[in-house]
Image (cartoon, rainbow, N blue to C red):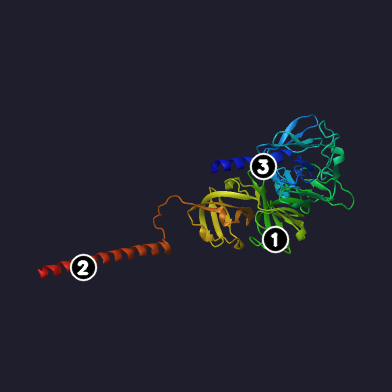
Amino acid sequence: MKKVVLFLLISIFLLIGQTIQATAKPILINQILLGQNEGAKNEFIELYNPNDIPINLENYTLKKKSSSGNESVLVSNKSFIGVIPAKSYFLISSPEFGPQIKADLYYSNSNSLSKNNTIILYDNNKEISDKLGYGQVLDFHTQPADLPENNQVLKRIKTDLNSPNNFSDFSIEKNNIQLHNSLGNTITINNYQEEIISTSSSNKNSSTKKGQKNIYYSDLKNYKKLSDGDLITIEGVVSVLPGSLGTQYFYIHNNYKDDTNVYGLQIYNYNKKFPELKIGDYLKINGELVVNENGSVLNYKLKTKEIEDIKIMSSGQEIIRGPIEKIANFQMTDLGNLKKIKGEITQNKTKQIYLDDGQEIMIEIKKGSGISNKIFKEGQEFIVSGILGYSSNQLKLTLIDEKDIEALQKNDEKPLGEVLNDDFWEVENKKYYQKILQYLGLTIIISLIFLIFKKKIIKN
């Protein structure tokens, strides 16, 4: 009887929940960004919940429709997961831009927003919850909204559920761009006033307005196309903290889709002006590119002036380690990148450790890293990761974390002539003493039995 009552109560609660959700106001598209000058994939869609209750967005679908009417998926119903709180927001973005703006959900494919699109949000009943058409489109509410340019947000300024009108309900916002996620975070997007030129541009030396400086936006994959003294904006994940390898610099690294390389760059400040950083912080950094020539070898670093030049966009990002590579395949253009190698330690002397995989490379351990060179046993194989560098006319791999060192045992047997450590002898001594005690105990027992047996014989 109790089970029947419990089943009925659960059914009633579920039915009430479904009824409330079914009669709730639709989830709305609140604002969108199509892209920025420094990143075509810097886009987002912000949703708003006008209800006094949270709404579960599971099995919702987000699509876009081109000006010709072709519809494609941005977030499929299988990938749509999350709850949008009452009178609050939910942030969806491209995977490239999502970590920077703390998005709640990323696109489930490689599609992205374009000019002259209609964005359509379907609820879990496959009914249209809201749609926003902008520019020259065929699908819209009453009248299409104005077409925003790069760095401009198309933002909802009023809500009329009975007579929605994309043109009058939305306005273009050029400055003070703010967006919100379901956790209540408010994220401000910088709207660059200085001209930003992509490194992919074929005309790097294009003229600008008088008094205006060129800032070249680059990713870690392409900054080496720029020149000494160029001002750049770049992004990456903190892989080495200030003070670990040197007090005046740290490193950022990043990897990119369909590319096994993990690209990196040293971030330098003469006065050690750095914000409080953690491994895994995703940064956007403004600075001057410094290129030092050492014969035919070019070494790069980014020089900053103030703490404000380094902005923490998000935290907790994973630093990817690439696949194992052969030393012989390393190029001078790889300097600064994270590399993983496997080989035998051929030498371990003071400040001179070498690993051989068919070709030798020097393994460098900086004092601030906290790594002990005693880890490396000559003749033993290791897998190690580190930053590829060049000095004293040879390649080197600078280790950054003891977790990136993996010792490989050839077998479980101890090799002939191996020098055993103190722990081994301590264990062997314990075994020896245990055997002595066993013999003593056995001797005492036999002696007692003999004495007892002897007394009985004498009495008889």
Disc 2: which residue = 448
Q: Are marks 3 and 2 in contact (CB under 8 Å)?
A: no
Callout 1 amino acid: Glu
Say which of marks 1 and 2 sits in front: 2
- Residue that badge 1 annotates: 276
Q: Position of residue 87 (x, y in %)?
A: 76, 47
Label 1 close to label 3 by CB (< 8 Å): no
Q: Residues within 10 Å of mark 3 (few under 14, many from 20)?
A: some
Kindly report which numbered mark, 1 or 3, lies closer to the viewer in this rendering: 3
- Tag of residue 360: none
Q: In the rendered image of this protein, does residue 167 appear above or below residue 196? A: above
Crowd class of label 1 (few under 14; some 14 to 19; many from 20; radius 10 Å): few
Residue occupied by mark 3: 81
Q: CA distance from mark 1 to mark 2?
A: 75 Å
Q: Which mark sits nearer the N-terminus, 1 or 2? A: 1
Please name which of the two marks, 3 or 2, marks the residue nearer to the observer: 3
Q: Determine the CA span between mark 1 and mark 3.
A: 33 Å
In front of the other: 231 or 237:
237
Residue 304's spot in the image, x, y percent?
A: 75, 58
**Total numbered labels placed on residues in the image:** 3
Helix, strand or loop under label 3: loop
For the question of whether residue 135 can be seen, the reply is: yes
Q: Amino acid at mark 2?
A: Leu
- For the point 66% across and 59% down, which residue is it? 241
| Element on which disc 1 rests | loop
Q: Residues within 10 Å of mark 2 (few under 14, many from 20)?
A: few
